[in-house]
Every structure is written in C-alpha cells, then in structure tokens.
Image (cartoon, coloured by chain):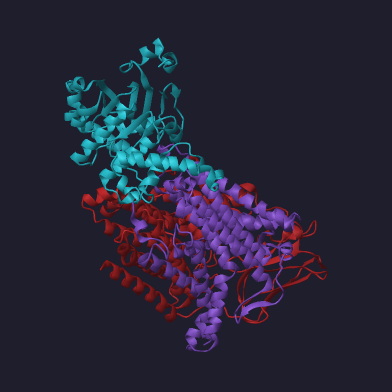
Chain colours: A red, B cyan, C purple
C-alpha cells in the first residue's frame, strides 16, 4: 500500500522534473569555431616575453594556457563560447615589472560564438602603495561576516533536519542553487521581474520543493524501515539528480542578476561595502534573529526543539512529528534559497554553487554542533570569517582549506561541536 | 590474597580521615577511592570508598538516576571520572581504555543488550575469546596459524551455548533472537572472555519470570565457579534471592551497604525507594543525564 | 538506430579500465562500510594519493614508476592514519563529514598554485606510465568487434586492472573470513559491545581504513597508468559518490557486489550516453528536444543515475546481491 504510494509519488516527482526540462529552454553552449583569448604584453613600449597566462572555465577547470612570445603576443584557444577567467602569473613577470592594477590579475570575460577576444593586462611600475595589512584585514572581516551570515542561513535547515531525523542531507546544497537559479530565471531570463520580487518567488518555490521532497518521497520511505544509511543514499541520489537537472536548465556558465550588479561602495573608516552587500548583511542578520525568536517563542519553534531533543518523548506528548519535520524541510529549504539568492547577488549564479557551499555548510554545522540551529549560526559565522580572513595571508584559491581545517581541528578538541552536547553510553 | 598490603596503598590514616570508607572487605577484588563524576554541576557519582569482595554476588540497587549505570561506565572505562582511582586485584585502572580493563578480567554487559545482530550466535561467542592469534591482521590470511586455535574456540563456544540452552540457535543471526535469548547470549558471551569479575547491568530487565529464574540460576552457577559478580537490579525479590551483599545508591552516593536482610530493614533505604527525595532526584537526573534511562 | 554501436560502447565501458578503477574503489569502500561500518565519503582522497604519489615520483622527482606505485600506496596508509587516529573515535556521521572534507582539502591543495612545482597544480602531470607500457607483450592493433574494441595498450591496462580486482576481492574475502574479519564485522554491529570484550576497536578500524584506502589507492594508480597522467579534476567529490553508487548497486558486504556494481554502473552510464548521442545523430527527435539533448548526454546520464539511486533505495535497498533481511536486523 504505502509501497505503491511512495513509488507513485517518486515517479510523479521524477516526471515533473523531466517534463519541466522540456518546458524550459536550455542555455548550454554550442560548439563554435575559433573562440580564443589573445593579447600583447608590453612594458614601456617594449614587448614582454615568457609570461604565463592561464584560462579556467566557469567551474574552475583549466581550459588552456600560453606563454607570451618574443613579440609579447599570446593566444589561448577556447573550447567554446562562454564565460572564462584568465589569470596572468605574476611570478613569471620580469624583475621590476608588475601589474598596474593588482586587482586585475584575473579577468572574467564572456566570449560569444566564433569571436576572438583581446584581453589587456596593463603592466606598469610596481604600485607605490597597496592597502595596508590592517585595511586588508578589516575588509576580510567584513567579507567574512557577509559570507558567514549567508552560510549560517543556508546551514540552519541542514542542521535541523539532522537534529529531527538524523539525516545528513547531501542535497541541501542543491536547494541553495535552486533558489539562486530560479531567481535568475525570474529576474534576468524569462520574466524580467525585479530581483526582490524574483527572489521572493524563488524562495517560495524552493520552500515548496523542499517540503515536496519530504512529503512525497522521504515520509513514505520512513514508513518502510529503511536505515539511516539508505536515507543518506536517497539524498545523494537527489543531489546528483537535482544538480544535473539544474545544469541542463541553466548551462555551465556563471550568470549575474540584472539588478544591483554594479554599485559604488560606501566607506566607513577601513570598511568599504556596496549598498547591496550592506543590505544583504542586514537582511541576513534580521532573518537569523527572526529564526532564533521563532524557535524560542513560537509554538512550532518550541515543537521543533522538542522533537530535536527527543523525538519519542515529543511524539508521546502529542506533537505531530511528521508535521514538524515537514515545516523544517520547507522552512530550511526556503532559508537555503534565500542564502542562494544572496550568494548569487554577491558573487554570481552557477549550477555548482550550492555543492561547493555544502562542504562549508557541513563545516559550519559540525563546528557549531550537529542538530542545533544556533550551532549552525555560530559555526556559519566562524567558517565565513576563517575563510575570508585567511585570504589576507594565503592564496584565495585555498581559502576553503582553512575552513575545513578548522572543522577537523574543532572535531579533535570538542567533538560534540561548540554548542552540542556529549553523547552518553549506557 | 598474599598481596593484601599492596592492594590498598592509598588507605593511609590521613585518607581514611578525609574520606570515611565504605565497609572494608576481607579479600576485595575491586577497590574504589574518591570516585567523582559530574554532569553539568550535578554529582552523578560521588563515592568515597567502595570495595567488592572476591567470589561474592554483590547487588547495586537504588532509584532511577542514582548513578548505578554511570558507576558501571566509570569502573569499566566507558566513561572518565572527574577524579578518583580504582584497582582490580591491585592493578590501578584509572585512565585505561575499556578494552584494556576487559582484558584484565573485568567484563561488563549492558542494560540494553548489545547483540551483534548480523553475526551468527556462534560468531558472537567467538568474538569474545581472548588473545586469538587469527585476530592479528598480519596472521589473518595465514589460516594454518590459527585454524587449530579456532577449533578450540568453537568447541568452547558451543559448550557455553549448550550450558545456556541456546545451542540450537548457534548458526542463526543474533538479530533473530528473542529478547530473553539475547540476555542469555550476552551473559554467555561475557563468560567466553574468561572474566574474574562480571558486571551485569540489569540482567533481568524486560525478561519474563521463567527466564529470570533461569538467568539467576546461571548467575549462581557462575559464582559457584569462582567468578565475582556485581549486578544492578531493580527487582528486590531478585536481589534478596541471590545476592550476598547489597550496595544502596541514591543521588550518586552510597547510602548504605550490607547483607540483604540488613539493608531492607534500613529506614533510609525505604525512604530512597518509596521516595521522599524521589522527586528532587528525578528532576536533577533529567537535567543532568538527558536521555540516559538509568544512571 | 545502430543498437550494435550503443551496445558495443556500453560493453566497452563496462569491461574497460574505468570500470576496473571503480571496482577497486568500491571494493575498498565495501571493506570500509560493508564490513567495518566506516562511513567513508573521502575514498576519492585515497585514489588521488595513489595517483599523485605515483605521478610525482615519476614526473617531478624523476624516479622509477615501480618506486612511485609503492610510494603512492604508502601515502594512502599515511592518509588513513592521519584521518583515522583523530576521527575514528567520533560518531559515524562526523566521520563521514570529516572524510569528505579531508579529501577535498587534499584536492584543493594539490591544485593550488603554491603546489604547482610538485603536483603541476591545475595543469597536472604527464608522461608517467611509459615503463608500464614497455612491459606490454600484446601485439599492436585493435582487439574486439565494432565499437566493442580496445587498443593493445588499453587491453594491457585492463588485464592488469582486472587481475588486481580479482586479487583485491580475494584479499578482502580472506580477511573477512578470518577471526580478524569477525572482529571487524562485530565492530560494525556494536562497537561498545566489542570494546567490552577486550578488543582494541580503534586499531581494527584503523587497519580496515588503511587496507580499504590502499585498495582505493590502487584504483588511482590504474587511473594514472591508463591516462599516463593525472589532473586534479579527476578527483572531485562526485567520484566518491559514483563509487558508492556502484557499490550500492551491486550490494554491500558481498564479495562480487562491488565488482558487478562497477561493471553495471559503467555499462549503463555509457549505454545511456551513447543512446542519446545516437538519438540526436539520427535526427529522430523534434528539434527542440534535439537541441536540448545535444552535448548534454553526460548530464542526463547523471540525472538518470540520481533517479536510479533513489529508486533503488525505494525498491531494492540491499542492491542486487545483498540480502534484504540484513538491512533490518538490529536497527
């Protein structure tokens, strides 16, 4: 009975996913001929030889590299149209030569079919004065708080779902991506809605999707005595499924929202922040506080904490555990989608963003203590700070290493997490 | 024992004055000093002194949350005390991991039986045999090195299963056993490890009266073979029936100890069980110990 | 529609070196989780160390391949110890998260620019396996029929890889049937119970982690031999999930499960991709669909894989060879 029902709902879910594939168009690249980056490196009118330039695609995979010739010219063939990032290796610049603007070491450029794009890496005297370490640190802390708040928001659902059902949801990252991509569709692609409206719509849809997964797939499966491991595999399957459906929809390239893309920064002392980022930080903080108040004060919030504490006891004292889990799935998915929209505004939208964020979310919830919402918040902030502050001293490409390193370190010192409670034997 | 003097070096006069001991025993196998364990400020276990007499059956009783299971966890190395020392046959056990303590001859069972579900009953028994050559990784593939020993282990396992009346289940997966059969298996398995001291955490909990009788019989037989037994029990009939000595705990402390008849006549024990302090204790325990059913 | 082409492609993938690589990775995972209960989501880290250890010895340090392979496998043992000693005392979910994080840390470090001098950074390392192919005694040319055919060198890698698969399966079987394996399986069931019987459970778990990791490392070695090079993009977290998918498809805690699972996994994956390529090549589809599918067969096969995993858990969670009954005992 429940067997047939769950199967039917699983099939329905898949059918919806597949059908929706065909309703929307696709944005992925088609092969063309002759896309390339090229340029000439000059310093004081003289060509510069032997400088290495490499190009990575939207997901960070290297697609080509070149070394400038004796005439200073270089060229890199690209696999097709799309958005790429070209980086000049400053270590290979001759002594006394540097980039005129050190910020422009990496250029992100979109290439259309059949076009060869010239790139300019302007070389000049070494800059007289970069930002001081203090200024860098201040900016990194600000960025850390910004990303930390977003990670925290994304991770609350992950942590609460674990607390309620003991499930590590590997598909939680895809809820983040779903929110970001839906908002992009509503904002930039299909409807041209203002980003705020598009974001709200995306969050509602993502929340419904999260609730739908719980209601039509996981709840029926829970009735069938599957072990925790089998549920984990289900979420891995969902994650692979959702991620690649999103890839099919959205294509492999990074995209930006139309609104608030370019803004002048406000400066407060050593801190510089765009109005957009400031608003996002403020909104994130408000949302996190609202979640905390909800958990403390609201009936449902108390029920959530009761179930997380002891499901059997909560059930026997008359709490509808299934309903609580459904609410947490929907709300957790909505929060993740909010995080996705924010992250998409601050950086860019791409199909892998949620999966990359998932590891940082894992780090956040384990650091804070698996299963608690407040732990996710504290852990998220810490992880955001650690990743961003590390870039003051270390290469930004390994900033995630520091976050995950902190996770491992924290597990050694306090395995139950910062706010978690020790398990008992007996 | 001949090493009586080395068995209790801490028992200087100063120590005695600072911490008045529990009742001294003629030939203690286990001695505990100043054992303290707190959870969030609540003293779950706070025992100045406790001795277990060799070759006896000792019952530990007390209301829920008295600290009985926590004491078991501390003594067998599954939990670490905040302070305290304890010795088995004169060997200090403080800081040793649980498997080392088990190897020294103190083997425990658990309140909720821990049968190894997807191993056969026979395999459950075989795992418990000590110092098997084939359990070393470097010899695991060299069958001829451990095959003779394996046969001896199996023979002994079957003997014990026969004794406990579950030999017909030997090749079944342990997960298919009934609750009572699991209790039997767990006790037989503990024996397979050749213990000097067996710690049974509520051996009769959730077992029907007929099987309880048979479990008690096994405990008595074991004891007759010279194995010292400590067990946690709620059923006073059982306690009166088989124990030589009774230790009463409440709120982490030892309320009193003595022969069974002595203890049941004690006013304090009646209080502890009938519960003037009961409510306060339960509350404290809920806070301190969370999900642990009994402590 | 040329079904012989599709079937040929699928069969070539199902028996090819990729399938053997995943079979090895899954055999290691099977020892980890199927027998020892260790939820390792960082198997790709072991593969990466096996591969990069070998490649670095040859390409960076100019050493011999035959020194490189044991070096790579030695790194796997070191990784198992570094990972296991601090984390094996933790709950299994924490262990899972730590392993996935550790493998990704390794990958990010290997591809970072400071490491470029040793690992080749984002460019990887090439020209590693020449001395392996020098040993190839097979004649030149292609072997097989139609699309189901391999070059001489491919066949040579395959022979070695499948021999290793058989050896590793036998090794795990032998270990599991020994008293050592009995303790390991007992730990999977209830670690506290085994501790109470005087076994040093952490040591056993560490040993199981290291052995399964070395088998995963062998998968990485075969990968290096097959491509004669390494790149960090081959070792994304997804690879671990695919190895898990193969293992679960075949069935946990069985000897043939991981092997058959890996073969089926690649057979189905390549079959689907080949089928979609044929569909669009033959213009059998309405334009809108053809545009959509063109070049997207990789993504679509992963979508189907995701659906397959969910469906498998709903309908036959024990996999093809597993026993359903075992799922429920004691849980």
Q: Nearer the viewer, residue C243 or A192?
A: C243
Q: Quadrant of the C terminus of chain B?
A: top left
Q: Quick one: quadrant of the N terminus of chain B? A: top left
Q: Is residue C151 left or right of residue A72?
A: left
Q: Is residue A57 above or below residue A418?
A: below
Whether residue A406 can be seen here: no
In the displayed structure image, the side of residue B205 where residue A160 appears, left or right: right
| Residue depicted at 19% across the width and 21% down the height | B261
- Residue B235 can be seen, yes or no: yes
Up-down: is C287 above or below A361?
below
Quarter of the rendering containing residue B26: top left
Q: In the rendered view, does B291 fall on the left or right side of C111?
A: left
- The x, y position of residue C69, in whole percent, is 67, 55
At horizontal 52% and vertical 54% (from top left) the residue drawn is: C172
**Residue A307 placement (x, y as % from top left):** 29, 51
- Percent across and percent down for residue B60 are 27, 28
B295 or B171: nearer the viewer: B171
State whether residue A49 is above or below residue B112: below
């Amino acid at each position: 009975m429940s067997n047939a029902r769950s199967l039917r709902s699983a099939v329905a879910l898949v059918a919806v996913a597949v059908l929706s594939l065909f309703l929307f168009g696709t944005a992925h690249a088609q092969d063309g001929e002759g896309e390339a980056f090229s340029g000439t490196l000059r310093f004081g009118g003289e060509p510069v030889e032997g400088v290495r330039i490499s190009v990575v695609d939207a997901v960070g995979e290297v697609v080509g590299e070149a070394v400038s010739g004796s005439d200073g010219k270089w060229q890199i063939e690209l696999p097709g149209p799309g958005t790429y990032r070209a980086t000049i290796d400053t270590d290979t610049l001759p002594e006394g030569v540097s980039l005129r603007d050190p910020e422009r070491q990496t250029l992100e450029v979109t290439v259309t079919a059949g076009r060869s794009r010239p790139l300019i890496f302007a070389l000049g005297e070494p800059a007289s004065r970069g930002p001081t370490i203090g200024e860098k640190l201040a900016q990194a802390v600000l960025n850390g708080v910004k990303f930390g708040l977003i990670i925290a928001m994304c991770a609350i659902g992950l942590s609460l779902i674990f607390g309620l059902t003991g499930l590590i949801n590997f598909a939680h990252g895809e809820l983040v991506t779903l929110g970001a991509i839906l908002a992009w569709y509503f904002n930039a692609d299909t409807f041209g809605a203002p980003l705020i409206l598009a974001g709200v719509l995306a969050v509602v849809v993502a929340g419904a999707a999260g609730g739908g997964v719980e209601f039509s797939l996981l709840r029926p499966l829970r009735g069938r005595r599957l072990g925790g491991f089998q549920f984990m595999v289900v979420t891995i399957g969902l994650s692979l499924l959702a991620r690649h459906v999103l890839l099919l929809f959205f294509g492999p390239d990074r995209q930006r929202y139309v609104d608030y893309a370019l803004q002048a920064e406000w400066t407060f002392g050593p801190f510089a922040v765009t109005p957009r980022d400031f608003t996002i930080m403020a909104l994130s903080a408000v949302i996190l506080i609202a979640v905390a108040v909800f958990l403390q004060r609201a009936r449902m919030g108390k029920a959530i904490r009761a179930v997380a504490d002891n499901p059997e006891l909560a059930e026997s004292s008359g709490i509808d555990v299934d309903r609580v889990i459904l609410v947490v799935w929907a709300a957790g998915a909505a929060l993740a989608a909010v995080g996705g929209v924010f992250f998409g505004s601050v950086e860019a939208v791409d199909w892998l963003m949620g999966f990359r964020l998932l590891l940082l979310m894992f780090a956040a919830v384990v650091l804070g203590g698996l299963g608690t919402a407040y732990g996710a918040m504290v852990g998220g902030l810490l992880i955001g700070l650690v990743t961003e502050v590390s870039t003051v001293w270390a290469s930004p490409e390994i900033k995630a290493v520091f976050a995950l390193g902190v996770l491992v370190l924290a597990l050694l010192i306090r395995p139950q997490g910062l706010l978690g409670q020790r398990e008992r034997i007996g | 024992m001949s090493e009586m003097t080395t068995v209790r070096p801490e028992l200087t006069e100063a120590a005695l004055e600072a911490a008045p001991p529990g009742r001294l025993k003629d030939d203690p196998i286990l001695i505990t000093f100043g054992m303290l364990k707190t959870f969030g400020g609540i003293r779950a276990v706070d025992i100045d002194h406790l001795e277990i007499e060799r070759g006896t059956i000792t019952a530990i009783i007390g209301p829920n949350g008295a600290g009985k299971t926590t004491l078991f966890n501390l003594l067998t190395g599954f939990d670490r005390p905040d302070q305290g020392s304890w010795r088995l046959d004169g060997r200090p056990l403080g800081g040793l991991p649980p498997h080392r303590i088990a190897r020294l001859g103190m083997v425990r069972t658990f309140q909720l039986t821990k049968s190894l579900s997807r191993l056969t009953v026979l395999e459950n028994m075989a795992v418990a045999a000590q110092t098997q050559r084939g359990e070393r990784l470097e010899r695991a593939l060299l069958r001829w090195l451990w095959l003779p020993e394996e046969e001896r282990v199996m023979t002994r396992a079957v003997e014990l299963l026969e004794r406990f009346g579950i030999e017909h289940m030997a090749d079944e997966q342990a997960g298919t056993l009934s609750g009572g059969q699991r209790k039997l298996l767990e006790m037989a398995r503990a024996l397979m490890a050749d213990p000097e001291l067996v710690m049974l955490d509520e051996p009769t909990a959730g077992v029907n009266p007929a099987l309880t009788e048979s479990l008690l019989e096994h405990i008595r037989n074991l004891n007759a073979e010279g194995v010292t037994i400590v067990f946690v029990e709620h059923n006073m009939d059982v306690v009166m029936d088989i124990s030589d000595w009774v230790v009463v705990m409440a709120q982490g402390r030892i309320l009193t100890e003595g022969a069974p008849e002595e203890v049941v006549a004690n006013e304090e024990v009646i209080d502890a069980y009938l519960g003037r302090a009961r409510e306060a204790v339960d509350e404290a325990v809920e806070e301190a110990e969370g999900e642990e059913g009994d402590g | 529609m040329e079904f012989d082409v599709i079937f040929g492609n699928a069969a070539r993938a199902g028996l090819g070196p990729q399938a053997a690589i995943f079979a090895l990775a899954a055999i290691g995972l099977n020892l980890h989780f199927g027998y020892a209960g260790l939820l390792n989501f960082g198997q790709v880290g072991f593969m990466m160390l096996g591969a990069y250890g070998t490649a670095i010895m040859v390409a960076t340090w100019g050493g011999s391949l035959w020194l490189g392979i044991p070096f790579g496998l030695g790194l796997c043992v070191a990784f198992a110890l570094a990972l296991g000693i601090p984390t094996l005392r933790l709950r299994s979910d924490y262990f899972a998260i730590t392993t996935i994080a550790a493998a990704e840390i390794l990958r990010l470090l290997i591809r970072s620019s400071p490491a470029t001098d040793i690992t080749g950074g984002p460019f990887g390392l090439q020209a590693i396996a020449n001395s392996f192919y020098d040993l190839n005694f097979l004649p030149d040319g292609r072997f097989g029929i139609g699309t189901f055919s391999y070059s001489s060198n491919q066949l040579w890698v395959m022979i070695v890889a499948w021999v290793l698969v058989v050896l590793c399966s036998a090794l795990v079987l032998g270990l599991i049937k020994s008293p050592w394996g009995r303790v390991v399986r007992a730990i999977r069931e209830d670690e506290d119970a085994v501790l109470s019987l005087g076994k040093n459970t952490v040591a056993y778990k560490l040993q199981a982690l290291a052995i399964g990791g070395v088998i995963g490392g062998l998968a990485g070695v075969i990968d290096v031999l097959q491509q004669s090079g390494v790149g960090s993009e081959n070792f994304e977290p997804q690879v671990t999930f695919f190895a898990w998918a193969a293992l679960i498809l075949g069935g946990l805690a069985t000897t043939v499960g991981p092997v058959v699972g890996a073969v089926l996994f690649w057979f189905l994956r390549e079959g689907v991709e080949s089928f979609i390529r044929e569909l669009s090549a033959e213009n059998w589809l309405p334009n809108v669909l053809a545009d959509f599918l063109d070049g997207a067969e990789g993504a679509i096969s992963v979508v189907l894989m995701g659906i397959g995993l969910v469906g498998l858990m709903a309908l036959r969670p024990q996999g093809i060879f597993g026993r359903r009954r075992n799922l429920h005992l004691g849980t």
